[in-house]
Amino acid sequence: MKVAGYNLIEVMVVVFILGIVAGVAVPACEGAIAGYELQVAARQVVSDIRYMQNLSRDLLQDGLELDRDGYYIYFNTENDSYSIYKNFSEKIKEYSFPKSVDLYDTNFSGDRIALKMNGLINPGGTVIIRSRKTGKFLYVVVASISGRVRISSDYPATGSD
C-alpha cells in the first residue's frame, strides 16, 4: 500500500526555491520602504510649513501682534530634527526624522525659516533630505514671493519659483 506524501528531497527543493525567492524579494521591498519613508518625511516638512503659514495669517486676521516674525522653524541637521517656535521662545512642536532619513542640509540663513505675519517667507530656500538606505534626495522648495511650498526630486534651479 502506497502512502501519498512528499519525500525529504522534494521538501528540501521547495524550501531552497522559496529561500532564493525571499532573498531576491526582501532587498526590493527595503528599497520601496526607504523611498516611502523619505516621501513621508518630505510631506511632513511641507505640512508643517503650510500649517505655520496658516497660523501666521490667522494671527494677522485676529489683530494680534507678535514680536517680529511670529513663527519660525529651526532645522537641526546634526540631530536630523526640526522645531517650530512661536515668538522665538515657545516651542510648539518638535519633529525627528526616521533613522533611515537624513536632514542633509538647508540653504536658509541659520538653518531657520522665519514667517512674516502674512505667512510669507523671505527669502525662500530649500530643505534637502536624503535616504540613508538608497542615497536618494528629495528637496522641499519654498518660494520667497508666493510662499508656495513643494517637493521636488530634482535640485531646484537658482531663481526658480
Image: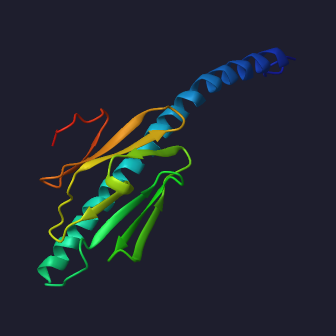
Q: How many marks?
A: 0
State the residue in front, 144 or 93: 144
Q: Is residue 103 above or below residue 157?
A: below
Q: Position of residue 101 (x, y in %)?
A: 50, 45
Residue 9 higher or lower than 56, as above or below: above
Quarter of the image for the C terminus: give it: top left
Horizontally, is 6 left or right of 99 in the view? right
Residue 154 image position (x, y, % from top left): 30, 32
Q: Position of residue 160 (x, y in %)?
A: 17, 39
Q: Determine which quarter of the picture holds residue 116.
A: bottom left
Quarter of the picture containing the N terminus is top right
Front-most of residues 100 and 110? 110
Identity of the residue drawn at 83% across and 21% down: 3
* Position of residue 99 in the picture relative to residue 3 (left or right): left
Foreground: 14 or 49? Answer: 49
Q: Is residue 128 above or below residue 48?
A: above
What residue do we see at 49% from left, 53% from top?
97
Q: Is residue 120 rendered to the left or right of residue 112?
A: left
Task: Classify residue 120 by image quadrant.
Answer: bottom left
Residue 93 in the image: x percent, y percent? 42, 70
Coloration mode: rainbow
> 6 and 64: which one is in front?
64
Q: Residue at x 21, y 36 (%)?
A: 158
Q: Residue at x 33, y 41 (%)?
A: 139
